[in-house]
């Protein structure tokens, strides 16, 4: 959960709980909401951002990102959810994050033709996946890989606010996007380092690998 007060578990529950109940009553499932919200966010990111509609894209994506938070409330109210649902939700989060930065990267490269902005956005794209992977891989090894300066909510807020401000209908704040991307790139790199530091200092991190773990380590990620 985010460190931001307005995205705390209690604050989010006030919005998600009644909506989750309503969706469950009409027959939606938590997994269904996850897929719908992700598909809509990806569609918006890969159509509105590359065409330069950054303000509209930021609003639409933020709506569906907030909508995606409802699936957790639905899962809790319908018995706690399943392990598959948790994996599906995490996978869809990575897909939507990747789509957001791919859309912005396309605009930076072919719309603005801004090489430094392309570099910053590429860093954001890669680190958005690496930050999550460090945690997942650490937990699979029984280690601690969470924490760090920013998590997914902060990452999306910085990226979407920067995109939206740069394309305001009345007075566009053009520098907002490069400022946001470079700020996010620096914060994301720092978060990667912090998480690796946490993994390195987790209990058991220095223990030798067992034979089966050595074989797994030699296998390429698929």
Image (spheres, grey):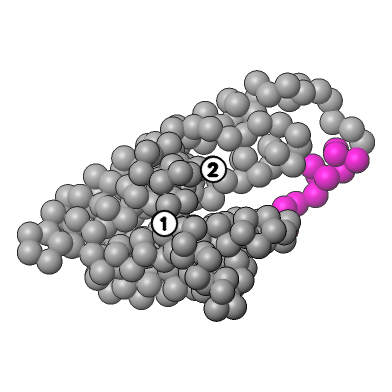
In the image: residue 100, left or right of residue 32: left
Instruction: Identify the magenta region.
Output: 212-222
| Residue 50 quadrant | bottom left
Return the disc, 2 or 1, that comes first in the chain's sequence: 1
Residue 175 percent coordinates (x, y): 17, 50
Q: Residue furthest bottom?
A: 26
Residue 99 appears anywhere in the view: no
Count the marks.
2
In the image: residue 148, left or right of residue 218: left
Residue 70 appears anywhere in the view: yes
Instruction: Name the residue carrying label 2.
Output: 131
Closer to us: mark 2 or mark 1?
Answer: 1
Instruction: Name the residue carrying label 1.
Output: 15
Q: Measured along the vertical axis of the image, is residue 58 above or below residue 215?
A: below
Q: Quadrant of the C terminus?
A: bottom right
Residue lying at 75% horizontally and 34% vertically, measured from the top left: 142
What is the crowding at mark 1: few (fewer than 14 residues within 10 Å), some, or many (at least 20)?
some
Q: Measured along the vertical axis of the image, is residue 40 above or below residue 131?
A: below
Residue lying at 84% horizontally and 25% vertically, measured from the top left: 208
Q: Please identify the dominant SS of the magenta region.
A: helix
Q: Secondary structure at mark 2?
A: helix
Q: Secondary structure at mark 1?
A: helix
Residue 164 percent coordinates (x, y): 23, 59
Q: Nearer the viewer, residue 78 or 36?
A: 78
What is the crowding at mark 2: few (fewer than 14 residues within 10 Å), some, or many (at least 20)?
many
- Distance, label 2 to label 1, CA atoms, is 28 Å
Residue lying at 36% horizontally and 64% vertically, measured from the top left: 63
Is 121 colored magenta in this rendering? no
Is 218 colored magenta in this rendering? yes
In the image: residue 165, left or right of residue 121: left
Residue 197 percent coordinates (x, y): 58, 25
């Amino acid at each position: 959960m985010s460190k931001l007060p307005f995205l705390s578990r209690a604050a989010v529950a006030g919005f998600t709980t009644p909506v989750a109940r309503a969706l469950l009553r009409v027959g939606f499932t938590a997994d269904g909401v996850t897929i719908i919200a992700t598909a809509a966010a990806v569609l918006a990111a890969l159509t509105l951002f590359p065409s330069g509609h950054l303000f509209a894209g930021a609003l639409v994506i933020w709506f569906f990102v907030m909508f995606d938070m409802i699936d957790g409330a639905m899962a809790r109210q319908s018995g706690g959810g399943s392990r598959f649902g948790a994996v599906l939700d995490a996978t869809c989060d990575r897909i939507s994050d990747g789509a957001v930065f791919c859309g912005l990267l396309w605009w930076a490269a072919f719309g603005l033709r801004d090489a430094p902005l392309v570099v910053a956005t590429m860093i954001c794209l890669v680190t958005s996946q690496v930050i999550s992977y460090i945690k997942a891989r650490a937990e699979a090894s029984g280690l601690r890989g969470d924490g760090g300066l920013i998590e997914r909510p902060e990452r999306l807020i910085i990226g979407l606010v920067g995109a939206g401000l740069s394309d305001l209908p009345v007075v566009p704040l053009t520098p907002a996007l490069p400022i946001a991307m470079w700020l996010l790139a620096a914060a994301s790199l720092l978060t990667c380092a912090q998480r690796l530091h946490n993994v390195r200092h987790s209990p058991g991190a220095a223990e030798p690998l067992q034979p089966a773990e050595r074989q797994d380590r030699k296998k390429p990620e698929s």
